[in-house]
């Protein structure tokens, strides 16, 4: 796994940070999900972490074709290919396909385009089984969510969308949610209704 981390660092590919990864592995291990959904495959690092912590299968979505190829290599290298299905495409489109197919998941790792979390949330709620967990990474966006005055015009909509997502999930009565101010911030939300 260090090899994958080094590859990501050298090639400027964002992967889950170390302390967040520990929480991700612990949550996944505790729940032992049968079906995991991941938005934002990158090169497969977080997918491998989750698969190593449970016996379930992973459906992961990635838009970048080069990253899908790299992720496939990594899943194969670590003998996880049989437990993984990678969808290459736009996450919102793929989520709608899953919803229309009545798919359900026990664990969802949300680590895709940050400004889109708020758009994904209503669909993710429907895809998540009761007692399942939604784990959303990078929800503080390097501190910008709590300091919107310092956000450039270019990034303002994305940061506002993330702030709206955080407020919505933390106040949703269907979830018991906790925001962790570690690394770049993450929310662990258990679906209780």
Image: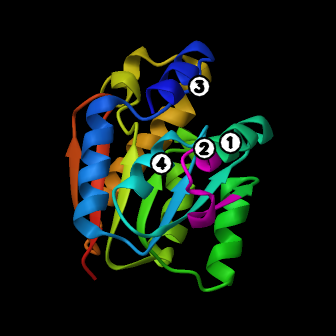
- Direction from residue 163 to residue 152 in the image, left or right: right
Mark 3 vs 4: CB contact within 8 A:
no
Residue 83 drawn in magenta: yes
Residue that carries the numbered disc 4 in the rendered image: 48
Screen quadrant of the C terminus: bottom left
Residue 13's mark? 3
How would you rate the neighbour count of disc 2 (Cα within 10 Å): few for under 14, some for 14-19, many for 20 or more? few
Which badge, 2 or 3, is on the more N-terminal residue? 3
Q: Which numbered disc, 3 or 4, marks the residue that appears first in the sequence?
A: 3
Q: Is residue 3 visible?
A: yes
Residue at (25% x, 72% y) in the render? 173
The residue indicated by pointer 2 is: 77
User: Is the Cβ of the residue at disc 1 closer than 8 Å to that at disc 2?
Assistant: yes
Q: Dot 1: what SS?
A: helix
Q: Give the residues in magenta.
A: 75-86
The image shows residue 158, relative to residue 35, as above or below, that is: above
Which residue lies under the disc numbered 1? 73
Rendered view: 62 above or below 14 = below
Residue 19 in picture, x, y percent from top left? 26, 33
Which residue of the protein is positioned furthest toward the bottom in this rendering?
Answer: 102
Label 1 environment density (alpha carbons within 10 Å; few <14, some 14–19, many ≥20):
some
Examine the structure image and report whether residue 107 is included in the region drawn in magenta.
Answer: no
Q: Quadrant of residue 134?
A: bottom left
């Amino acid at each position: 796994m260090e090899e994958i981390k080094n590859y990501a660092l050298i090639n400027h590919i964002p992967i889950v940070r170390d302390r967040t990864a520990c929480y991700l592995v612990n949550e996944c291990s505790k729940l032992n999900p049968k079906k995991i959904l991941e938005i934002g495959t990158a090169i497969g690092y977080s997918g491998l972490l989750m698969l190593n912590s449970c016996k379930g299968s992973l459906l992961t979505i990635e838009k970048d074709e080069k990253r899908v190829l790299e992720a496939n290599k990594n899943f194969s290298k670590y003998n996880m290919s049989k437990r993984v299905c990678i969808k290459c495409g736009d996450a919102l489109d793929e989520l709608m396909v899953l919803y229309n197919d009545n798919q359900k998941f026990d664990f969802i790792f949300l680590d895709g385009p940050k400004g889109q979390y708020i758009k994904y949330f209503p669909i993710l709620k429907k895809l998540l089984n009761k007692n399942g967990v939604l784990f959303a990474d990078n929800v503080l966006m390097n501190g910008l969510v709590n300091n919107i005055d310092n956000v450039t015009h270019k990034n303002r909509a994305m940061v506002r969308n993330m702030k709206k997502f955080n407020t919505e999930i933390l106040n949703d009565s269907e979830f018991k949610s906790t925001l962790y101010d570690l690394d770049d911030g993450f929310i662990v939300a258990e679906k209780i209704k």
